[in-house]
Amino acid sequence: MNEDFLDEVGKDPRKTSNNSNNSSKEPQNQHDEQPPKKDNKKKWYIGCGCVTVILLGIAAFVWWAIAFNLEEEARDIRLKYLRQDVERLSTFISDDNMYSNLAKMCIDSSIYLENGEKIDKSGIKYFTRRNDDKLLVILKVDNLKKVEPSSRRAFVDALRECFSYVEEETGVEKYYISIKGFWNTLMVATPNGSDLDGKFADDKYLLPFYNEYVKDSLPDLGD
């Protein structure tokens, strides 16, 4: 027989089949599909839209609040007088400002926290105004978060106690006290009503302090 024919007959047909299978599988392994990459652009656009909506909402609220306050001031000029006095709050107190100096002395010597933490008393802003037998005292304390709302009235109590010692000398009989936080008025104490829960108080309790100024039709109040 032909030797080439014998060589072909002697070969194992299974090996040939296996080799062909392996060769056909190798390209598939090389072309395995990679997992699709996550597209974060859509999430980013969604997040950006939410922030825009929030900012527009805040801007609309601020615009509404300003318009509402101006309308209120047009109806009651005492609100304008109060706003002007609040804008005069300052950490600087001149030596001839007896009432603000007394208020500062009361707070510096009387207010301590039970947990040992300290309030930055140097950052407290003061304003006082005398009107006959009435005294307006406004304080702005920005860092009251560390003080429990129920304990914040200590500021009002300290002012009341200190001023009571000098009533005979000053002739003041009625006190209009306001304690403001970073965002809003926290406490108000007046002869015609008080709000001392330490969270939110209505400034309208302070308006009777300005009654005489309204009668005189003063367009503005100086220091």
Image (cartoon, rainbow, N blue to C red):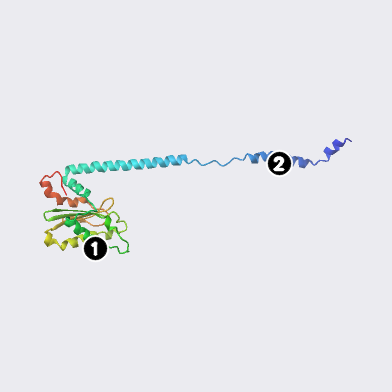
Tell me what residue is drawn at x 13 percent, y 55 percent: 134
Q: In this orientation, does residue 157 appear?
A: no
- Disc 2 from disc 1: Cα separation: 91 Å
Q: Which residue is mark 2?
A: 22
**In this rendering, would 47 be left or right of 32?**
left
In which quadrant of the rendered view does residue 55 lie? Answer: top left
Q: Secondary structure at mark 2?
A: helix
Residue 116: % across, % down: 32, 64
Given residues 128 and 51, the one toward you in this image is 128
Residue 68: % across, % down: 23, 42
Identify the disc placed on residue 127. Answer: none
Residue 65: % across, % down: 26, 43
Q: Earlier in the sequence, mark 2 or mark 1?
A: 2
Q: Secondary structure at mark 1?
A: helix
Q: Residue furthest right?
A: 1
**In this rendering, would 175 be left or right of 26?**
left
Q: Which residue is mark 1?
A: 109
Tell me what residue is drawn at x 16 percent, y 62 percent: 164
Kindly identify the amino acid type of the residue bearing the numbered disc 2.
Asn
Residue 1: % across, % down: 89, 36
Say few, some or many: other residues with alpha carbon within 10 Å of mark 1 (under 14 / 14 to 19 / 20 or more).
few
In which quadrant of the rendered view does residue 10 lie? Answer: top right
